[in-house]
Amino acid sequence: MKITTERIESMMRDCTLCPRQCHADRLSGTPGFCRQGMEITAARAALHFWEEPCISGSSGSGAVFFSGCSLQCVFCQNHSIALGRTGRTLSQERLSRIFLELQEKGAANINLVTAGHFVPQICLALEQAREWGLSIPVVYNSSGYEEVSSLRLLEGLVDIYLPDLKYRSSSLSARYSHAPDYFEKAAPAISEMFRQVKRPVFDPDSGLMKRGVIVRHLLLPGETGDSKKILRYLHDTYGNDIYVSIMNQYTPLEHLAELPDPDRSRLQRTVTPEEYERVLDFAEKIGIENGFRQEGGTAAESFIPAFDGEGL
């Protein structure tokens, strides 16, 4: 069914876009679990150079960082915007023009960062931008905690899916994201993403991804066992028809001091080189060929962009 303004308003009256199923009347201004109402809110729209090489390329990915989040991980690097404390409201038309402005700046793609709670509005903005000349791929950059029905609205509009798969353990996802159902929601969500875009396709000249799925997994300190279960699941399910990005950039931030022990003490260190190497060795052992690794020095606050309203 085609997205219309009337349909968006209907969905916003009783919001079930994400697995939280909060039923907030966002149309009337009541924030959902995501901390957002009806209006599109974003914190930054700019060229971003810190994604995987086939996403950022040499010119940068045209990243739009949306405010709010339906997951709310306690260790989130984008803490201020996830809580909805930072951002500017945008009309659907302005968002369409932002996409075109990023394309004019040479962006390799349009990168929708944490956009799940605005999916219907973004669908309209993408359709309008295409009518006005948007021709570069669209990346959907997600926590992985998604409703399949919402993802189906994006079919034909998104070329590359870039979801996380954060946890296999329900106790870990409950502890750090208040979402014991994380894996049972993220696994079918990634399956739907793969159904839509299938195996990866790359530009033979630039090496940029044009279509496909890259699943990110961020190691947490002391949790290599769960990381191995995630990698085993992905390889058993998709083989080398997807890419897996194994990330060591976990960064302890100041707001973790607010957590009670023992969570605070567990999370107040980076992942050790030995932990990371154990997980990389495991990935190689089970046969993962299409993947990305991070080099040292990625666990630093300097890699977190300034959410200062640039490009909005």
Image (tube, rainbow, N blue to C red):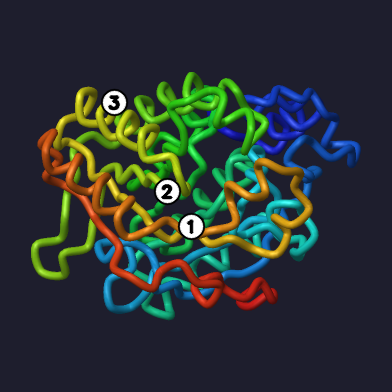
- The answer to whether residue 91 of the structure is visible from this angle is no
Residue that carries the numbered disc 2 in the rendered image: 218
Give x and y (percent) for residue 44: 62, 69
**Residue at x-position 62% and y-position 28%:** 174
Say what secondary structure mark 3 lies in.
helix
Ranked by sequence position, the earlier of labels 1 and 3 is: 3
Total count of labels: 3
* Image position of 240 (left or right of 213): left
Per the image, label 2 sits on a secondary structure element best described as strand
Q: Which residue is mark 1?
A: 250
> Residue 39's x, y, as percent?
77, 50
**Disc 1 residue type (three-letter):** Tyr
Above or below, 45 relative to 260 = below
- Marking on residue 7: none
| Residue sitting nearer the eye, 291 or 17 | 291
Please provide percent x and percent y for residue 26.
Answer: 82, 36
Say which residue appears at 67% left-offset and 43% top-offset: 72
Residues marked 1 and 2 touching at CB (< 8 Å): yes
* Front residue (pair 171, 166): 171
Q: 263 or 14, which lies in front?
A: 263
Q: CA distance from mark 1 to mark 2?
A: 7 Å
Question: For the residue carrying disc 1, how many other residues have a C-alpha within 10 Å: few (<14), some (14-19), or many (20+)?
Answer: many
Name the spot of residue 243 as percent of width and height, x first. Answer: 23, 45
Residue type at the position of mark 2: Leu
